[in-house]
Image (cartoon, grey):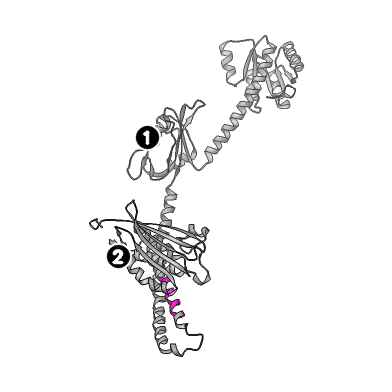
Amino acid sequence: MLENHSVKILIVEDELIVANDVALTLKKNGYEVVGISPSGESAIQKAKDHQPDVILVDIKLKGKMNGIEAVEKIKTFLDVPIIYLTANSDKETFENAKITSPLAFLIKPINFNELYTTIEVALFKHKMDKQLRESEKWLSTILNTIHDAVLASDKDGKIKYINPTAHKIAGFTLANTQDSTIFDVFQIYDEKTNAHLVKYLYDALSFSKETIFTRNVVLKLQHKEIPVQGRISPILDAQLNVMGMVIVFQDMTQKRLEEKLLQESTEKSEKLKSIFISQISHEVRTPLNNILTYTSLLKDEFNNELPKGLENSFDVIANSSNRLIRTIDLLLSMSKIQTGNFEINNVLTDIDKDILEPLSFDFYPKAKNKDIKFTYCNKAINSKIIGDVESINQIFINLIDNAIKYTQEGFINIEVFNDMNNFVNIHIKDSGIGIPEEYIPDLFIPFSKNISDNNMQGTGLGLALVKNFVDLNNGKISVSSKLNEGTEFIISFNVVNETSPD
């Protein structure tokens, strides 16, 4: 509220005795009287010159222009609270004056206590009205310029507001929807089931429930369907009673198109990558096989005649060539998985007899050569699963090979047992170099940071493939490890009976 000493008041009154009396009283109470105008024409000029904060106006003025007409002119250039002074309290006078939106009427003779109260209330109300108008202007500007479509209705579903974006997207206007409700206009359906989602609208009005719709929703119009997403929210008053609802939605047509193009581009890229890897693999594998073949022949021919220091040269060549071939195989397998071209042949398989026992025999000599204690123990009553033998073999070849490669001394234990949840669990535990804790979250990500020293670096593809192969066989895998103490992998598969269907 404005302080009295800063409030400028213009008095428009043709009875000079009354006007001077009012002016004197206002000045005594701290108001600034910027002028007294006996006519409408002079009131307009004084209002322009002094920009008053309040105007007191007698409705009946002498001359060509009455108080109401003067106020109409003033309102065109000055937003100021108007208080009418009148000796006439008839209905017609009030109705004519109401057109100019005055903030108060005072009946002559004027009660000065009532005058002070009326001025202060008028100032406060005008200030609040101005703030409200500014807020409404801000809100209107925002709603009219945002890229989201907005619809609002009252509690009966009658449409009260439609922003320009809603018109642009769907052609909605207040004019062409005036005889319709929000239920008639906002016809949304589940794209897959064709179910009408009008329940979302009723929920907002009946249960004060907000609904978010994000995918597979279409807005059906007269001649087209538009994929949309958005939200429907109830509008509540201070007592949390429902006053209406607001719908905010976006047209997803362009985004759908972009997603489709991105998917097609990704699929094309994956296909080209697969073809590229396949061709490169073929080109590299052939000379590598030749290198291995002729290295073996040269080793047999010259092994005993090599100069000192070169005795292991042929083994180094063979090991490096085999490492490259393994990397190529890993890349091919990963490419097939990523493009969905990896063929799965699910059959009844015994993890113990068909997979782990043969692999243990194969890896035992390799562990023994490093003086590592290698043990395999099957405690499972039932180790039969439905799975793809080739990919399951690759899981354990990778894990056991890594265990031997990263263990310099100590042990490698493989144990198989059943749990209470109809799973067969395989634990592969070693006393190797271990894995730093910060690397474990990324352990199964292709090309993730190496955990080994420089002499044992790999591509990071092996464990990524292990995780993919476990997933392809509906299994689970977890890992625990401590640096310089060892690592344990646990792989679980659901067991079945021999009579279970493939």
Q: Residues within 10 Å of mark 1 (few under 14, many from 20)?
A: few
For image coordinates 41% across by 89% down, the residue present is 301
What amino acid is at disc 1? Lys
Q: Is residue 272 visible?
A: no
Q: Amino acid at mark 2?
A: Lys
Q: Secondary structure at mark 1?
A: helix
Image coords of residue 401 (percent x, y): 41, 69
Lower position in the chain sequence, tag 1 or tag 2 = 1
**Tag of residue 279:** none
In the picture, the disc for residue 199 is 1
Residue 286: image location, x then y, percent? 39, 78
- Which percent across, then down, holds residue 181? 40, 31
Where are the magenta residues, as a range?
Answer: 316-328
Quadrant of the image occupied by residue 66: top right
* Mark number, residue 353: 2
Image quarter where the C terminus lies is: bottom left
At 40% from the left and 67% from the top, the residue drawn is 400
- Given residues 475 and 223, the one toward you in this image is 475
